[in-house]
Image: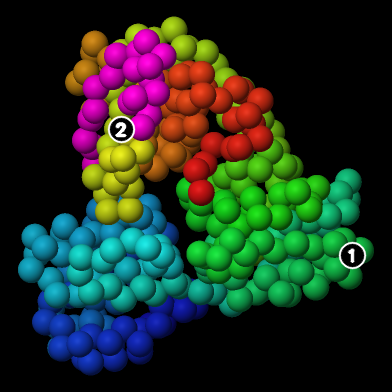
Amino acid sequence: MKSSIFDLEEERVKEEVEKRGAKRVLIQLPEGLKPEGPRLAAVVEKAGALAIVSADPCYGACDLASEEVDLLGADLLVHFGHRAIEGKPERVPIIYVEAKTDVSLKTAVEKALPLLKPWERIGLVTTVQHVDMLGEAKEILLKAGKSVAVGDAGHLYAGQVIGCDYSNAHAVVKDVDAFLFVGGGRFHAIGVALATSKSTVVADPYERRAYSVEAEAQKIIKQRWASIQKAMESERFGIFIGLKSGQRRLERALQVRDKLEKAGKETTLLAIREVTPESLMEFPTLNAYVNTACPRISLDDATKFHKTVLTINEALVVAGELTWEQLLKKGWFEG
């Protein structure tokens, strides 16, 4: 039974497995696509390979199950739901299936128009699932009298944003008054608002509705100011070095350590795969943390942690390298 919403490219997967002569294949899916795991495993098995579905969480193309491939002796990884990150070396052969969708976005975008009424110049952004449909969204906005900008920073599809990379939004931020995010959920839209300091509206084609994330973004910004103020009073910092394939930023962690130590702070480098409240509780002498892995951990999970977990840019404010005003302009994400 084929998925009715996402194109999981079953035939391409089958052909690639056969062409490569793969004998053992690991299938990796984000949470929303995990229900498709058993069916996709059957597709791989029909191609003549042993199929294993990863049951661990998957947060993006920065979170490839490369080590799991090694542990299981797999000779191919099939990664669903994301596009490859340019410039990141691949330790194992990987097939990326972006899981595009043709669900209609017309109703949701039209419902967004009243919310966009205060602004004339609109930046248009989306996830990989909808990049092929941005033209349709643009036409609706143009007919409503808006000017539309779709950013293209060069390493993602034009208009595409991912959880930690809003460079396409930054590429047009000076040319727009607000952003329209086309896609499901608040996650990426809040990221756009935090990265650009611009009002952001969601047009959700799955729920066929539109809404603003302005209030949520402002709440997070106030929380982050409080976190920075608290961290300024801290003396001992733990600095996370992510161990996931696309989150390993040792050099950046060392740079942050040097800046904090110059500001009179004590630091300890911590290698970590999953940042959880429980893992932080194991270091009672540390007062605060700097997260150089996925910045969304600091922003989205802040209330779960008993101690402050800063992003890199927030740590630079604590170190005196950035002002709060510069952080607001620069945004919470690097890249």
Residue 144 image label: 1
Q: In the rendered image, which quarter contains the N terminus?
A: bottom left
Observer able to see residue 113: yes
Q: Residue at x 38, y 16 (%)?
A: 262
Q: Amino acid at mark 2?
A: Leu
Q: Residue at x 61, y 23 (%)?
A: 324
Identify the element where label 1 is drawn.
loop
Q: Amino acid at mark 1?
A: Ala
Q: Which residues are magenta?
A: 255-278
Query: Residue under circle 2?
Result: 254
Percent from the top left, x then y, of residue 265?
35, 13
Q: Residue at x 55, y 57 (%)?
A: 161
Within 10 Å of disc 1 (Cα), the crowding (few <14, some 14-19, many 20+) is: few
Percent from the top left, x then y, of residue 190?
60, 43
- Viewer-side residue, 13 vs 331: 331
Identify the element where label 2 is drawn.
helix
Observer able to see residue 190: no
Residue 32 is left or right of residue 157, and the answer is left
Q: Please report whichever mark, 2 or 1, sits nearer to the chain's N-terminal start.
A: 1
Q: How far apart are labels 2 and 1 at the CA level?
A: 50 Å
The answer to if 310 sits in the magenta stretch is no
